[in-house]
Amino acid sequence: MSKNSKILIAEDDPFLGKIMGNYLKDEGLEVDTAKNGAEALDLIDKNGYKVILLDLVMPVKSGFDVLEELKKKKNKTPILVFTNLSQKEDEKEVMALGATGYYVKHNTAINDLLKIVQSYL
Amino acid sequence: MSKNRKTKANKKNILHKYSEQDIDNFKIEISILKDAYFQLKETKSELQESEDSYKILFENSHDIIQNVKPDGNFTFVNKAWIEILGYSLNEAKKMNIWEIIHPEHLQHCKKIFSGLMNGKDIGLIQTKFITKKGKTINVEGNISIRIKNGKIFSTHGFFRDITDRKKSEKDLAKAHNELEYKVKKRTAELEKEKASAEEKARKLDEMKTATLNILEDMEEAKEQLIEKENKFRALFEGAGDTIFIVKMDQKNAPYIIDINSRALEMFGYTHKQMLKSSPLSFAPIMQPDGKSSKEKTIENIKFVLRGETKVFEWDFLRSDGTQFSTEVTLNRVKIGGEFFVQSIVRDITARKEIDRAKNEFVSLASHQLQTPLTAIKWLLQVLLLKEKMTKQQHSLIEEALESNERMIRLVDDFLNVSRLDMGTIVANSQKTDFIKFTENLVIEARILAKERRQTIKFIKPKNKLTVYLDKNLISQVILNLLSNAIRYSDPKKKIVITIKKLAKTVEISIKDQGIGISKKDQKKLFAKFFRTDRASEYSTTGSGLGLYMIKKIIKVCKGHIKINSRPGKGSTFTVTLPIKGPVSKKEDARDLIERPIGKL
């Protein structure tokens, strides 16, 4: 896997972030984690990622904010939104902001998460 | 005369033989005889005279006089008899009485005659004679008897022709009858007139009574009206909502003709300022949905004047310029034969705030709940995937995962129900290949069915079927129904899902061989949190929200759902959806809002 095959997980819930991170690492992926939108934007600026897993409801800067800023920066990195907001309206808004995929966390099995991520690598 | 001559010749012979003495004696005797003779002669003459006068009487009598022997033969009839009965005297002498008696009276007359022969007094009799020419004459008279040597030898009958009298009597009777008839007729007419007059009088009386009753009723109605008016006025004035009575003028401009005191509080104007004003002067130019207040108002008023009721949310302006949210109910009311629009305005600022807060709370709560539930889910899944454990440990983790899944579903359902209840869900119809869409759902459901070794048969139309529907909402409906069919049927049972195209709708029916639902339970089936006892017993999981949501979603999508089921015989749920999709309006979703008004 190339140097930029790293993925970023932006997730404010530490426990959830840890489970996701550990699982993907176990599967051989390089993973960075951000606790909020602001941290995520910093890391993206610094490192550049192959895939970004983005939560929506986060402190300081939300997933929506991140998407907006990345859209401005003409981002090309696939952004997979993993959220617990299951409303269609949210999905529409997110896709309009340039997200690549929209997944409802509680409806997604962890091995499916892996498959989804792998499909973008 | 010959006798006298003989006596003279005898006298001459006798004079030669007898002495003077003898002659003198003779002379005396002769003189005596002469006297006796003259006396006799005189008597005879008197008798003759008497007889003549009787005869004259008889002959000149207008009455019928007849002498009849006991054997019935006539011995004498008078002139009147001959004239009236038409027989000649000679003919009469050969006839008997029975020949002139009318056959009708024959029996009766024979009886009388025989009575007479036996010495009975028969008094005045009336009978009918028949003339030679066959004419019937009515007679009245009497019969006397003549006795010789103690034996009846003849009868004298005196009869008077009373035909004319009878006729007169008859005529009189007729006249009398006619008169009587006329009198009766006239009486009847008079009676009728009287009855008619009485009827008229009675009707007048009735009318009078009715009028009086009406007046009384009116008086009562008036009193009741006053009472009602007072009651309504109290209701009107005491209402917690603003009530406007609005009229449309000829130019289709609405103006307020009555308001209650609550309006003054709500809007901050005086009675005078509000009355006769347009309700539009208290609304912003635009409503929150971006539509013109004026256009919407006129449209709504016209709609309501057709007899419909309209409930909608509306923003108004207070006298200080602040805007506030209301819910308006428009009704058509009839006052004095004229139609007006009654507008009930409820300030829903507080409710809106509560709705917003509730919405936020539910979203946040469910989101906050879903995060740790997802963490547990993924952790357990990782454990199952990565860790080596005993079979027992594995199955325990699987059970924990299953419980966690249920929790996730439940929280999801709560969120969905909450959103449905708030009416924030609107059907977003998309052109859909309905067979393909359903097939994908069937494939998804088959995974679940496989676990229970059940099969799902899919019956579909041959031709492509395009339906406009909200895929997200309808997939929830179909998956939910399929999952119920699976969940409430024994293993190895069959489930059949059928799609049928009807004229303007599409029908999806899901048939199972499951536990079934009683008629009693079917009535409550779509109520929030309702589960049948049998269902709870059969499957401990289940929130009682599934069918409630289905019903709500179907309502949003302008469809119908019906159930056909019998306990132990399985159930069939049939959903009907409009092929062209629901005509999506924001009001539609508002129909779903369920809130007890009294609590707000």
Image (cartoon, helix red, strand yellow):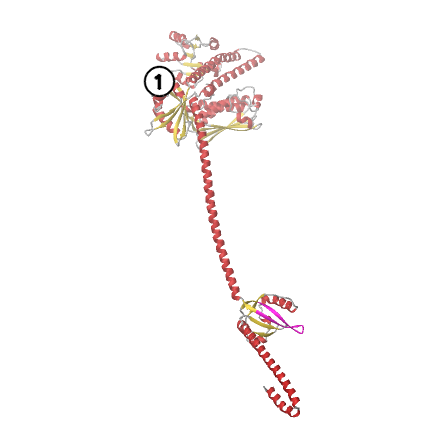
Q: Secondary structure at mark 1?
A: loop
At horizontal 46% and vertical 36% (from top left) the residue drawn is B213
- In this orientation, does residue B176 appear? yes
- In this orientation, does residue B470 appear? no
Query: x and y percent of residue A116 in the render?
Result: 45, 15
Query: Is residue B347 shown above or below B580?
Result: above
Q: Magenta stretch containing residue B89, yes or no?
A: no
Residue furthest to the bottom: B16
In terms of depth relative to the viewer, which is nearer, B507 or B116? B116
Describe residue A65's horizontal placement relative to residue A106 as left or right: left
Query: x and y percent of residue B419 in the render?
Result: 45, 19
Query: x and y percent of residue A78 in the render?
Result: 40, 14
Q: Main SS type for the magenta part?
A: strand
In terms of depth relative to the viewer, which is nearer, B350 or B578? B350
Number of numbered tags placed on the structure image = 1
In terms of depth relative to the viewer, which is nearer, B417 or A96? B417
The magenta-colored residue range is B141-158
Circle 1 chain: B
Q: Which amino acid, by three-letter code, is at mark 1?
A: Ser
Q: Residues within 10 Å of mark 1 (few under 14, many from 20)?
A: some
Query: x and y percent of residue B310 in the render?
Result: 41, 26
| Mark 1, residue position | B319
Query: Is residue B463 shown above or below A77?
Result: below
